[in-house]
Image (tube, rainbow, N blue to C red):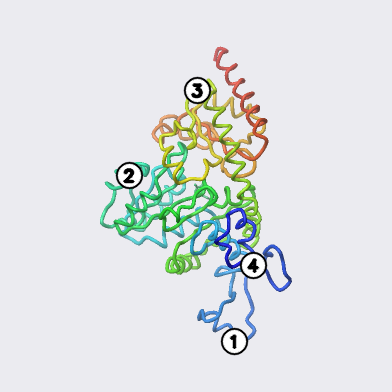
Amino acid sequence: MDDIRKHHQETQCIHASLKSDETGTVVTPIYQVSTFSFPDVDHGADLFADRKKGYIYTRMANPTIESLEQAVAVLEDGYNGLGCSSGMAAIHTTLTAMLSAGDHLICSDAVYGPTTTLIRDVLMRFGVQATFVDTSDLDAVRKALRPETKVLYIETPGNPTMVISDIKALSGIAHKWGARLVVDNTFMSPILQQPLKHGADVVVHSMTKFLNGHADVVAGMIVVSSEEDYKTFRSVLDETGGVIDPFNSFLVSRGIKTLAIRMQRHCENATKMAEFLGTHPLVDRVYFPWLPSHPNHEVAKRQMNGPGGVISFELKGGLKAGKILMNSVKFHMLAVSLGGVETLIEHPASMTHATMGSEARKKARITDGLVRISVGIENIDELIEDLERALAKVKASTKSPA
Ligand SMILES: *Cc1c(COP(=O)(O)O)cnc(C)c1O
């Protein structure tokens, strides 16, 4: 389908990935091979010289991987995609392709934890300078600009408070400065947000989350907006080697077939759950971009087609209440990660950030009552009942003497 880019995303989800072969397959098969043979020496020489199109070696290109790259690039309305072995491999490849020693990077202070660590503990060792700011504050971003600033890196919505950064305004600031804007679009998927259309230069995804959607793959994707970037990024990815493999590409391509309808249900369910939590007496605060009380609600409505499936909230009663809630839910599985069809719940103070201690957590702005839910596509009434039951247990326990 040559004109697939003109079609609706629901149609693109089904048709954008197809690379059929002479047998007429209706989905792209798994080309589970490391290397491709050449009919003769001249053909091999032409492939290496880029005079002919074809396959050489799977780290460089593979039909199953290409079909997924094509699908995500179409959905993001970008030039092309680069499939990576994880979201972190996509972020690492992107930043090493765009930055050199002496360059300066401005990064949202609310990005995914390992992204911060990658910048601080790896890139900065190689002479990259970085400043972390609240990128929902445009003045803070302007103040952080330096003559060496080459990249502005944001994640929106940002964890855990769902803070929203204005993609269009930030791309304007970056471009005026001669810098480029990278957006981690993992929380939204291209169905809910297309950063390139708002002026971003590069989009990265952890496909582990919504794009695959079934909690059975770790993978990443970069979508670039020009041929020039594509060539630079492809060469860095070839040489650093963090490529996705054919089997995982097949699984993610399969996940993408239902992306549009999954995102619709995630949004519906999460909105109902956020409304329920917002009225519950044991909940102090709900972080969800579609609630009018959200501080960046206006920007969210402008650049997002839906709120997504992730909700954070502050539970009254801190650590103890959080632990009881976690141990009382039935359909909410206790796990990190997000974006799958199953609902997951996480309480950082008792799980991921338990060893940090209360004081260090406070500094990192992780309160003891903070809970995150990645709302799945189960029946929402049953999910809310499950939460209601668990919250009743929290209430009962806080009444009894400690
Ligand atoms: C999970 C995640 C990543 C990292 O992705 P992996 O596939 O786990 O490497 C990056 N950014 C965001 C926003 C994420 O949620």
Q: Earlier in the sequence, mark 4 or mark 1?
A: 4
Whether the residue carrying mark 4 lies under 8 Å from ligand 1 is answered with no
**Disc assigned to residue 316:** 3
What is the spatial separation of the Cα atoms under label 2 and label 4, in whole angstroms? 43 Å
Residue 104 placement (x, y as % from top left): 32, 55
Asked if 100 appears above or below 169 in the picture, the reply is below
Q: How crowded is the residue under tag 2: few (<14 C-alpha within 10 Å), some, or many (20+)?
A: some
Q: In the image, is 214 to the left or to the right of 77?
A: right
Tell me the element at label 1. Answer: helix
Q: In the image, is 353 to the left or to the right of 327?
A: left
Tell me the element at label 3. Answer: loop
Instruction: Please tell me which residue lies in front, 359 or 168.
Output: 168
* On-image quarter of the N terminus: bottom right
Instruction: Please tell me which residue lies in front, 5 or 148.
Output: 5
Asked if 128 appears above or below 159 in the picture, the reply is below
Q: Read off the residue under disc 1.
A: 41
The kind of residue on which mark 1 rests is Val
What is the spatial separation of the Cα atoms under label 3 and label 1, in whole angstroms? 71 Å
Q: Read off the residue under disc 4.
A: 19
